[in-house]
Image (cartoon, rainbow, N blue to C red):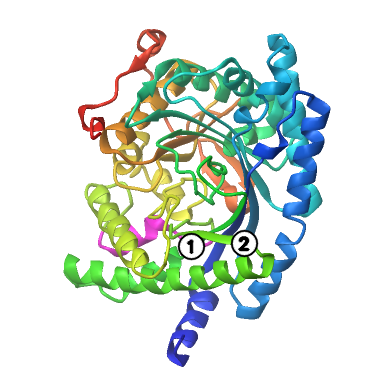
Amino acid sequence: MFRPEEIMETVKMIKMENLDLRTVTLGISLRDCVSKDLDELKENIYNKITSSAENLVDVANKVSEKYGIPIVNKRIAVTPISLIVGGAIKDLDKEEQIKACVEVGKTLDKSAKKVGVDFLGGYSALVHKDATKEDMALIDSIPYMMEKTERVCSSVNVASTKTGINMDAVKRMGEIIKETAYKTEKAIGCAKLVVFANAPEDNPFMAGAFHGVGEGDKVINVGVSGPGVVRAVVEKLPDADFGTLANEIKKVAFKITRVGELIGREVSKELGVKFGVVDLSLAPTPARGDSIANILEAMGLEKCGTHGSTAALALLNDAVKKGGAMAASYVGGLSGAFIPVSEDSGMVEAVEAGALSLEKLEAMTCVCSVGIDMVAIPGDTPASTISAIIADEMAIGVINNKTTAVRIIPVPGKKAGDYVDYGGLLGRAPIMKVNKYSSEKFIKRGGRIPAPLQALTN
């Protein structure tokens, strides 16, 4: 039971400190939709999604109103589409395979619009060791799919600690990101495309959400967000030692996560769907004060990105995980702190001040929940350089046995120091400087970087 003082404290978090439930995500298995006929496959997918999610938005809104907790996004995650389309495209030539995949993507978009969700994830392929022809067809179709859809998000897992790094896939994803940038307005398609190492199967956050093969038919996963709440706690302790600071962050993470579990279970009950996990990530928004960078600065850093930023982020991430894990029955997804640039006003200010570079961001990703996220770079950046940025981030994930990801946006016609504005949760991104020296010969080697020794745990 919640005590009255806990309820009042939660009300304060919502009204003054930007506490929200960032997403309620319904995971849906499409494995029973498989067909050798493309039209039948599309019909099966549309019917499965629309029947499964027809009440999702209404129920989420009802529960949000009941408890006074804002639910920012309602989302769907589906089985990775590369696993679903094989039978329908295997006898087609490459060009027809790509067109067929795009048609499936358009069906997903149509389904998402029908049920009223903000995003649908799962236009995905898992190629961390090697890729089938169907995997490659889906990957090659991503720029064309992004051009034709609005709400579909895509992810590709190219590395894992158990398998190493599929450098052929890394090379191709650098090219795909460039192609997507040129095919979508202001390169917006790249904001809906993420490249993973060690992708979690129960992640409710976009663009990386998909419904894993180890999941049931349907499941509700929720993502909580409260950077403003944590910042307020840190600001009240200007002279506390790090042990005390970590303990106070754990306490507030516990409270935030309890709210997430309450809402998630209520939505699950109303929909008659199993409850999955709480992802207790601190996901910032462009709103003033709702910033991971501001939390780090409240710890005593003049600007996020200066020396000490990685240590401060490590403390934050660890404390959030420890506090949240005690509050929920099942914690999963990414769970920790996100450091997207465009979506975090404090990160944008740090880039503008010259305190935060791409290289420092990479260092910070060693201890954050994801990786290089919502970073805009010059449009003329070579595909091989983008692939090399991906390879570096995948290496961090593989060696450290953690999830890492790259969501990077080469904006056509923009150079370092310019801006691109997406509005809403995606925010406004400064174009960041990229190392000018070539990585092309390195990327051309191809093959697979072997798994590290720590993979041999069987």
Q: Residue furthest bottom?
A: 4
Q: Amino acid at mark 2?
A: Val
| Local SS, label 1 | strand
Let me know if residue 432 is in the magenta part: no
Quadrant hosting residue 136: top right
Position of residue 142 relative to residue 343, above or below, is above
Badge 1: residue crowd in 10 Å (few <14, some 14–19, many ≥20): many
Position of residue 171 relative to residue 85, above or below, is above
Position of residue 434 relative to residue 256, above or below, is above
Q: Which mark is residue 76?
A: none
Q: Earlier in the sequence, mark 2 or mark 1?
A: 2
Residue 457 screen position, x and y as percent = 23, 35
Q: Residue at x 55, y 65 (%)?
A: 21
Residue 320 screen position, x and y as percent = 34, 62
Question: Which residue is at the front of the view, 106 or 192?
Answer: 106
What number of labels is visible?
2
* Left or right for 443, reference 382: left
Q: In the rendered structure, which segment of residues is drawn in magenta?
A: 287-300
Q: Which mark is residue 225?
A: 1
Report the residue marked by disc 2: 72
Q: Are marks 2 and 1 in contact (CB under 8 Å)?
A: yes
